Structure formats: structure tokens, C-alpha cells
Amino acid sequence: MKLSVIVPVYNSAAFISETFQELVDYLEKLGEEYELFFVDDGSRDNTGSILEELAVRHPQVFLIRNGTNRGKGYSVRAGMKRAQGNFSVFTDADLAYPPTEIGKIVQTLREGADLAIATRVAPASRFIMSPEFFGYIYTRHLGSRLFNWLVRKVLGLSIYDTQAGLKGFNQKAKEIIFNRQTLEGFTFDVELIYIAKKFGMAVREVPVVFRYFSEPTTVSFLMQSLACIKDLFSIRAKNRKRSYQ
């Protein structure tokens, strides 16, 4: 079995070396053939040059550079288009989901899922965070519940956590989904799940450990939320136009 891991990155110079080493160490311990793609989404710091130096010493690691900042969805798709693994997984650059959680996703795919998605709201999921973030995480949880309620109402998807940044695909699902993906921003996750459901794929939610490091500004959170809501109606409109056939 070959495993492909895709990591979209943007202005991550402060921690990308640690991320690189953690992922390589974990993937080496698995004892499986693997390939690791970092997709630099037009970083304005030296993220790309750091990754370029590190990748030279590891033949299984590849760097993809977007000429400009295109969005997380664009970056994930760019990595998936290059991936050759039996299973392909994408995860966040800050490793909010520890590398060990990749193994949970892969195991779920081995058990027959076409698409395996991390869920932070399952009873078995665990959060690791500083007490200073307790207030914000409560607000974020409420916002997430509202957004997922809208996802159910607008698109009919019964998924508890569409936006978790750890998802895995078998080869068939990867080809079908990423050949039809159109959204390049944060709501691309919803579109991936929507396409999977439309094609009758087996979608499984996986409890995970989630490490919470920071919080966005209020303005950033509100802007992202409004853009995501707009995208939900865009997905519905595209489906009515048969764009996902």
C-alpha cells in the first residue's frame, strides 16, 4: 500500500520545520511506502525556501508552489492531482491533528470507507488546549453548530463537522471528487463531501485528538463565516445546473 499525504501551507515559516520532521518521523515509522506533498500557497515569508531545503534530503517529499495565494481548496486539489497513493490524506500545516490521527483516517479507509473525515464533536474526540482559549472555543463550537445546521438545511448533508482539516480518500473517491471540485476557499470541504454523497460514496466520520493553538481575529472569523454561507448556496446552484455530473 502507498500513502499520499498533502499539507497546504501559507506563511508557516515559524513552525514548518517542526511540522516537516514530525510528519516524516511518523510516516517512516509506519513502514509503508509513502509520498508527502507540501503545497505552498504563495507564502510571503520564507516557507517555500525552508521546505525546498528540507525536501532535498528526502526523496519521498515534494514541494508544490502556487504562483499566487489561491486558497486552501486550490492547494489541496493541486496536491491530490499529483498523489499516486492507494489512499490520499490532507492535514493542516500546524498539525492541529497530531500525525497519529492520520493513521485513524487510513484505518477507516482500509475498513471500506471511500471518504474518511475527522470529527471534533464526537464523544470520543479529545481537545488539547490552553485554558485561555476556553471562551473562544465555546463561541466557535456554537458557530460550528449553526454552520452545520445550515449545511443540513441548504444541502441536505447530515455531517456533524464538515470543516475539520483532516480528511482521507481512496483512489476512486479522489478521482471522482477532485475532478469535480470548483471551490478554492475554506468551504471546499463541504463541496467535497457533497460530491461524495451525490455519487453514493461511503462517508465515515472519525473521532480524533485536536490540538488548539490559536484563535483568529473576530473580523477574520466573521468574514470567513459569511463567505462560507455564500458558498453553500453556490454549491446548491451548481448542482441544479448539473455541474457535478
Image (tube, rainbow, N blue to C red):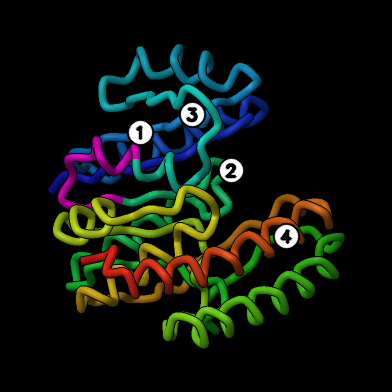
Label for residue 94? Answer: 2
Name the residue that disc number 3 marks.
40
Q: Residue at x 48, y 28 (%)?
A: 40
Disc on the earlier residue, 4 or 1:
1
Where is residue 151 shown, x and y percent of the image? 52, 79
Q: Which region shows up in magenta?
A: 78-88
Amino acid at the residue labelled 1: Phe
Name the residue that disc number 1 marks.
37
Q: Residue at x 33, y 35 (%)?
A: 36
Direction from residue 238 to residue 219 in the image, left or right: right
Where is residue 50 shown, x and y percent of the image? 53, 17
Classed neighbour count for the residue bearing mark 3: other residues with Cα under 10 Å, few (<14), some (14–19), many (≥20): many
Classed neighbour count for the residue bearing mark 4: other residues with Cα under 10 Å, few (<14), some (14–19), many (≥20): some
Where is residue 34 shown, x and y percent of the image? 23, 38
Of badges 4 and 1, nearer the viewer stands 1
Amino acid at the residue labelled 4: Met
SS of the residue at dot 2? loop
Compute the Cα span from label 4 to label 3.
27 Å
Amino acid at the residue labelled 2: Asp
- Please state which of residues 192 and 183 is positioned toward the viewer in this rendering: 183
Of badges 3 and 2, nearer the viewer stands 3
Compute the Cα span from label 3 to label 2.
13 Å
Compute the Cα span from label 2 to label 4.
14 Å
Name the residue that disc number 4 marks.
129
